[in-house]
Amino acid sequence: MATPLIELCDIRKVYGGVDSPRVEVLRGISLSIHPGEFVAIVGASGSGKSTLMNILGCLDRPTSGSYRFAGRDVAELDSDELAWLRREAFGFVFQGYHLIPSGSAQENVEMPAIYAGTPPAERHARAHALLERLGLASRTGNRPHQLSGGQQQRVSIARALMNGGHIILADEPTGALDSQSGAEVMTLLDELASQGHVIILITHDREVAARAQRIIEVRDGEVVSDSATPSSIDAPPRQVQADDLRQRLDFGATQRGAWKGELVESLQAAWRVMWINRFRTALTLLGIIIGVASVVVMLAVGEGSKRQVMAQMAAFGSNILYLNGKHSSEELMGIVTLDDVDAIGELPQVKRVMPVIGDKLMVRHGNKGEQFYVGGNNTWFPEIFNWPVVEGSFYSEADEANAAAVAVIGQKVREKMFGAGSNPLGQYLLIGNVPFQVIGILQGKGASSGSEDSDERVVVPYSAASIRLFGSRDPEYVTIAAQDSSRVKETEKAIERLMLQRHQGKYDFVLTNDAALIQAEARTQNSLSLMLGAIAAISLLVGGIGVMNIMLMTVRERTREIGIRMATGARQRDILRQFLTEAVMLSMVGGVTGIVLALAIGGSLLLADIAVAFALPAILGAFACAVITGVVFGFMPARKAARLDPVKALTSE
């Protein structure tokens, strides 16, 4: 005789225990079911037949006794192998249909094939063919609430057959149907039995049970009669044999399936659930949206303020190096020459170099006279100091070469010498005893520190200052602009090496810069930005708690769906992936919406003349934090869903 597909020996099932009454539902059931049998298990309500079906279908484990499937002890199988059996060997047809409400008839039928890793095109075609065979070709896109009871039961039969359905476990399949629909379902089961499927029918209706070849009666958890005969256990040639199923179990249970197909299905299911509960989803997303928008906007405002302050500091020349000879009270210890200036200008780290000679001199116009700082500079002055001329023009290279007596004045010099709103262009100032013609007016800059006012300044060609005003060709000091403002220290070291080489290794010069001031200010602004971002990140934490709360609620609401998925072959990792995907999708939608909101707020702030600077790393970082929040806070509910007991999940309300 062939190896039985199912062999039970002294199976017992006890509920309750230490803290609750002990109830023995199954009391030593022993039976064998062979390939090709159509078996009806009959019994009154409470007789234990549904518990027996759950054990047969590997949804539940017995308290004691031995259950061998195709010769393999089921007690030795792990959770993935049990899931393989439910997915590949068994097909469940429940009294309550147990279809997923959010999925169409086609999607419900395809579910076991998704967990089996069947390619999309193949499973679509098979599901459609099964529904067509069962008379539902025009109902493939309908959801369960759009189908009658008989149609829903046919969908569940199609789902049971999706992966082959070698053993159909039908629990009261006609119990919730009218007589006509019930007759149609029984005709389908007769058909399947004639095609070689093992049919195990659980029923309390003896008329329904009479359709089976073999009737097993259960009463009070025990088998009281079994009509098995040798002819009833002869397997048709086309029926799959136990040895074949065992070989497939040993091989198939180790396969991990097609994760891409499962992930796509998880995303589609997650989107359906979010859309169906869109109002609740929107409320849940508020925390994530506000959190992401707050982080992005706060960091953008901090970065904008930082750049604004840095730009203002740079406008005062604080990102420039200064070189001058070292002096003492007794004698001149070092002189920086124009030859040194030319050599420095050749360094690759140096962008611009400008000799400066200047001092406070008496400046007169008409009957007005006042001391202003008069500086001789070359034509790089506007670029180095980021200080443009707003009226007239700056002097040219020709003026510099000819030592022309021309001057560009600051806004305060204009006000004090010529009066506010006047036009001094073309007029003359007497600097010392030399007349200089005003050809341009500098943009207002204000005070850089203390009482010093940058606008009380007169700028003249270096050659004119050195010849006509100060009588010295050597600069008082040299102003140097580095090629890269972030590498001022590098530039400083290069200049230092050059000067030591030119001055025979003597440190008869001083090289200074205000880069430290910029760096200190940058650190302060960075700290402020981080503080603002940390405060805003609290909103993300609140949003994450909201995600966890809604996911816990979702698990509770969809417990039966989890049981259905497990009954159709979902592994624990499949359930974990399903609910974790939903949590991550919630966070991703919230993150994208939050970024859009942040950009809109940033645009409004820009219109209000508030410094804002969006940085791509900050935006991506906020989005990544939102996704991580979804993973972290969605993991616990997802793990809880994956660890649910299949039987308890299926019977939940």
Image: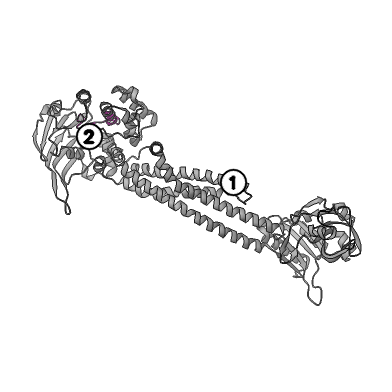
Q: Position of residue 188 (x, y in %)?
A: 23, 24
SS category of the residue bearing label 1: helix
Picture quadrant of residue 87? top left
- Between 614 and 219, the one nearer to me in the picture: 614
Local crowd at mark 2 within 10 Å, few (<14), some, or many (≥20)? some
For the residues bearing labels 1 and 2, Cβ distance under 8 angstroms: no
Q: Where are the magenta residues, as a range?
A: 156-175
Which residue appears farthest toward the bottom when viewing the image?
330
Is residue 441 among the parts visible in the rendering? yes
Is residue 71 among the parts visible in the rendering? no
**Amino acid, disc 2:** Asp
Q: Does the magenta-highlighted stretch encompass residue 473?
A: no
SS category of the residue bearing label 2: helix
What mark, if any, has residue 604 been given in the picture? 1
Residue receiving disc 2: 243
Dot 1 or dot 2: first in sequence order is 2
What distance separates the C-alpha of mark 1 from that of mark 2?
72 Å
Q: Is residue 617 left or right of residue 179?
A: right
**Amino acid, disc 1:** Ser
Residue occupying the point 73% across, 62% down: 447
Q: Is residue 479 left or right of residue 546?
A: right
Q: Position of residue 388 (x, y in %)?
A: 77, 52
- Between 567 and 366, the one nearer to me in the picture: 366
Picture quadrant of residue 209? top left
Give the total of numbered labels.
Answer: 2
Q: Nearer the viewer, mark 1 or mark 2?
A: 1
Residue occupying the point 40% across, 42% down: 280
Residue 378, compared with residue 284, is above or below; it is below
Residue occupying the point 88% across, 53% down: 426
What mark, if any, has residue 393 been given in the picture? none
